[in-house]
Image (cartoon, rainbow, N blue to C red):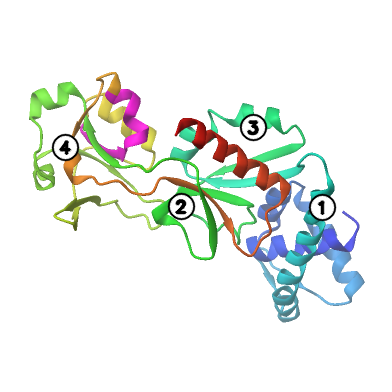
Amino acid sequence: MRDDLTGLTVLLAVARRRSFTAAAAELGVTPSAVSQTLALLEQRLGVRLVQRTTRSVGLTEAGARFVDRLEPALAEVRGALESLNELREHPTGTLRLNVPSVACRQLLQPTLGEFLTAHPDIRLEVRVDDALGDIIADGFDAGIRLGERLGREMIAVPITAPDRSAVVGSPAYFRAHGKPKHPRELLEHDCINYRLATRGGVYRWEFTEDAKDLEMVVDGRLLANDWQLMLQGALDGIGLAYLLESSVREALKAKRLVRVLEAYCPPFPGFFLYYPSRVGLSPKLRALVEFFRRRREHKG
């Protein structure tokens, strides 16, 4: 960690994270290495860039002004360096992805071995994140997200077919409590709720009736922020769960779950691999895009 480019990269990581420890984790080095690299950079520049206290790390006025101009400039440098990979026969480098847990389970886990075997020079770092984080601010190459949740200024590549929500319960649950025929009847049922990772609230079950949106606030004995736990709760007869159709397809086929209110659950865009439009498509990212495209075409 001696060259200036590394020092500037460390400075940007500290500016984003406001912590030596968090910046070190992002960069894969030790906190002491981050601190020493910054000290050397400040010594070479002759300006204090970072204000260190016992509780936090922040930028000085000079550091903040420097980072504002440095960030886009360094992005250009990275892009220029990345473009050199165009000359390589095989894609190479670390590919950092941000994905929600359901996409990790359904899309990444079944395909990781195949992708990495096909591209032995690529290293893959995956953060499982249901909070819909900012991939640009957090330094990710790309992310996976449902189409309806994509941000602006993103290039999005569809990697699954359209999906639908599904309200499901176990056969034993329905034998004991009957089946709701309208979303409003969910108020009479034990429903498994989902705690939103973004705002901490409880997700409202979304339906469509006569081309109009309908949201239901439901209640039940189980509240979780993990869809697999919710699925297991439905399988165990604890209550009804509101999940993606793709995540319960096998259980429905095996008749371990029964679906209700299907007419009120129209299709919506499935999962997309997305990345910033202002960032050139590197060979390593292009390899992943093409991998998912071929897989989707094969399934389609």
Q: Image check: 84 left or right of 22?
A: right
Numbered label attached to residue 115: 3
Q: Image check: 34 left or right of 25?
A: right
Magenta residues, as a range?
Answer: 239-252
Q: Residues within 10 Å of mark 3 (few under 14, many from 20)?
A: some
Numbered label attached to residue 202: none
What is the tally of numbered marks visible in this picture?
4
| Front residue of this view, candidates 56 and 192 | 192
Amino acid under label 1?
Ala
Q: Earlier in the sequence, mark 4 or mark 2?
A: 2
Identified at 61% across, 41% down, the residue is 290
Q: Image check: 107 left or right of 95?
A: left
The x, y position of residue 163, in whole percent, is: 35, 42
In contact (CB < 8 Å): disc 4 and disc 2: no
53 above or below 284? below
Q: Earlier in the sequence, mark 2 or mark 1?
A: 1
| Front residue of this view, candidates 121 and 59 | 121
Quarter holding residue 93 = top right
The x, y position of residue 97, in whole percent, is: 60, 46
Q: CA distance from mark 3 to mark 4?
A: 41 Å
The residue tagged 2 is 131
Closer to viewer: mark 2 or mark 3: 3
The residue tagged 1 is 33
Numbered label attached to residue 190: 4
Mark 2: secondary structure? loop
